[in-house]
Image (cartoon, grey):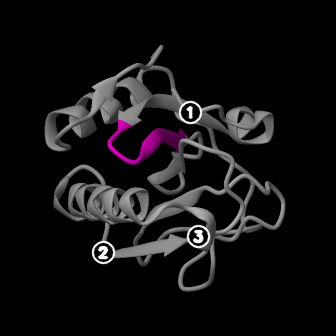
């Protein structure tokens, strides 16, 4: 398992391992929001070995397809970003957006107070994700 920085674990839940690294879900039910944290001590995209970058692209595609195709999520747009200004450990955000989310059409960062998932909602989302995404190693505690 990837060593994940404490600030990331305070706002997100580790749900398993994908080929490129650890998969987390941000505990904010305003947006279906995934994080991929590659194994290794990376700060910038260019620090990540090409083989891992290629795996990340495949994982981004899998997560993006899940977001767009899962009927319960109502996602119409995908935002992918690697900002890293607050948490220097490289992590990639994959965020599902819809026209009536609180931040639409602006960026989600710094917008709206977090709204944690209700009891059981996170597990249901993770189960649907696990059924969809290939090569997902269920290492969650949900």
Choose the circle earlier in sequence order: 2 or 3.
Answer: 3
Image position of 96 (left or right of 2):
left
Mark 3 or mark 1: name the one nearer the start of the chain.
Answer: 1
Image check: 75 left or right of 107?
Answer: left
Mark 1 surroundings: few (<14), some (14-19) or many (≥20) residues within 10 A:
some
Q: Measured along the vertical axis of the image, is residue 76 above or below residue 140?
A: below
- Dominant SS in magenta: strand
Occupied quadrant, residue 48: bottom right
Residue at x 34% of width, y 32% of height: 126
User: At x 16% / y 60%, what residue is drawn?
Assistant: 69
Residue 86 spot, x, y in % from top left:
84, 60
Residue carrying label 3 = 45
User: CB atoms at circles 2 and 3 under 8 Å apart?
Assistant: no
Q: Is residue 119 above or below residue 48?
A: above
Secondary structure of the residue carrying numbered label 3: helix
The image shows a total of numbered marks equal to: 3
């Amino acid at each position: 398992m990837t060593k994940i920085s404490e600030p990331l674990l305070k706002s997100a839940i580790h749900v398993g391992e994908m080929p490129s690294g650890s998969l987390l879900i941000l505990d904010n039910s305003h947006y279906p929001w995934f994080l991929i944290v590659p194994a290794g001590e990376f700060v910038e995209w260019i620090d990540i070995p090409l083989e891992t970058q290629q795996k990340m692209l495949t994982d981004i595609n899998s997560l993006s397809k899940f977001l767009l195709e899962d009927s319960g999520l109502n996602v119409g747009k995908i935002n992918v970003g690697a900002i890293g200004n607050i948490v220097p450990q490289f992590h990639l955000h994959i965020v599902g957006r819809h026209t009536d989310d609180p931040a639409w059409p602006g960026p989600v960062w710094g917008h709206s107070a977090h709204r944690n998932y209700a009891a059981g909602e996170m597990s249901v989302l993770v189960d649907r994700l696990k059924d969809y995404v290939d090569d997902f190693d269920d290492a969650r505690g949900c």
